[in-house]
Amino acid sequence: MNFSDAPVTILLIAANVLFSFVGFSNRELVDKTIMWPYYIKRNNQFYRLVTSGFLHADWMHLIFNMFTLFFFGRNIEAIFAVGGLGGNLSYLLLYFLGMIVADLPSYFRHKDDYGYRALGASGAVSAIVFASVVFDPWSSIYIYGALKLSAALYAVLFIVYCVYMDKRGRDNINHNAHLWGALFGLGFTLVLIAVRNPAIFNIIKEQLKHPSLFGNG
């Protein structure tokens, strides 16, 4: 794959890797840039809603998000370009607004909680994944490289899982950010199609007529 095939996706991945790598060994940088609702509220540090999206807890967290971004992001980057959907500008809006919107519910929930912090690109990546589902609902997605599901079925299960795990609240994963990032990606893409190229809905409708629980690919 050449850089010119998906330049924005590759640059986003590079920025995530570089910023996260520095953050792994720089506690001061993390403290100044992590999503920390308590400080956002009191010091108007709303930049943290963006900078925290380029930080990751560890290499596994980073690799998983960047692997997902690579495979789904390059497809959306291409579709937005050739489909008359605003190209790279729309793609960047999807990514960064997805990142911000995904964190807002957690900000409002924890704005008076000094100990709560969050980081990672999962909200933005979830927005990218759900944008992809809109265009190819019956494509195959492999969970952990083994379990094959259609994109549409995966999307439903993902939402149910995020809601359940958020209510359960027994791990350190911000499931609420995953959920709202995904929903934003879905809504943003549908609105974008309606505004920029409504004819795409005809293609999507034809695809929906041929469902496949386990995907066509």
Image: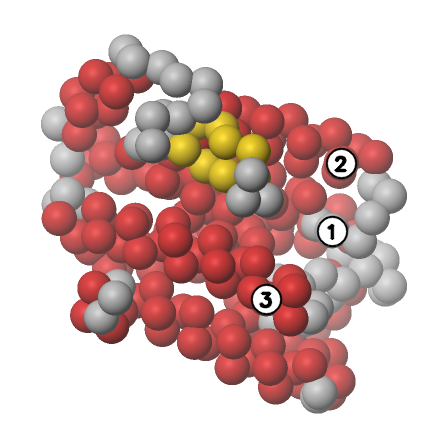
Q: CA distance from mark 3 to mark 1?
A: 14 Å
Q: Secondary structure at mark 1?
A: loop
Determine the residue located farthest toward the top in the rendered image.
Answer: 209
Q: Nearer the viewer, residue 173 or 147?
A: 147
Q: Is residue 15 above or below residue 22?
A: above
Residue, x 64% and y 26% (percent of image)?
Answer: 160
Instruction: Please name the amino acid that badge 2 sits on.
Output: Met
Residue under label 2, please give it: 165
Q: Is residue 53 left or right of residue 133?
A: right
Residue 119 percent across, percent down from the top left: 66, 64
Q: Is residue 37 above or below residue 129?
A: below
Residue under label 3, please give it: 62
Q: CA distance from mark 2 to mark 1?
A: 9 Å
Q: How is the image coloured?
A: secondary structure
Q: Quick check: marks 3 and 1 in contact, CB under 8 Å?
A: no
Q: Nearer the viewer, residue 137 or 146?
A: 146
Residue 212 percent across, percent down from the top left: 39, 17
Q: How many marks?
A: 3
Q: Quick check: marks 2 and 1 in contact, CB under 8 Å?
A: yes
Disc 3 or disc 2, which is closer to the eye? 3
Q: CA distance from mark 3 to mark 2?
A: 21 Å
Residue 198 percent across, percent down from the top left: 16, 29
Of labels 2 and 1, earlier in sequence is: 2
Instruction: Please name the amino acid that badge 3 sits on.
Output: Leu
Residue, x 74% and y 30% (percent of image)?
Answer: 164
- Rendered-image quadrant of the N terminus: bottom left
Residue, x 23% and y 31% (percent of image)?
Answer: 194
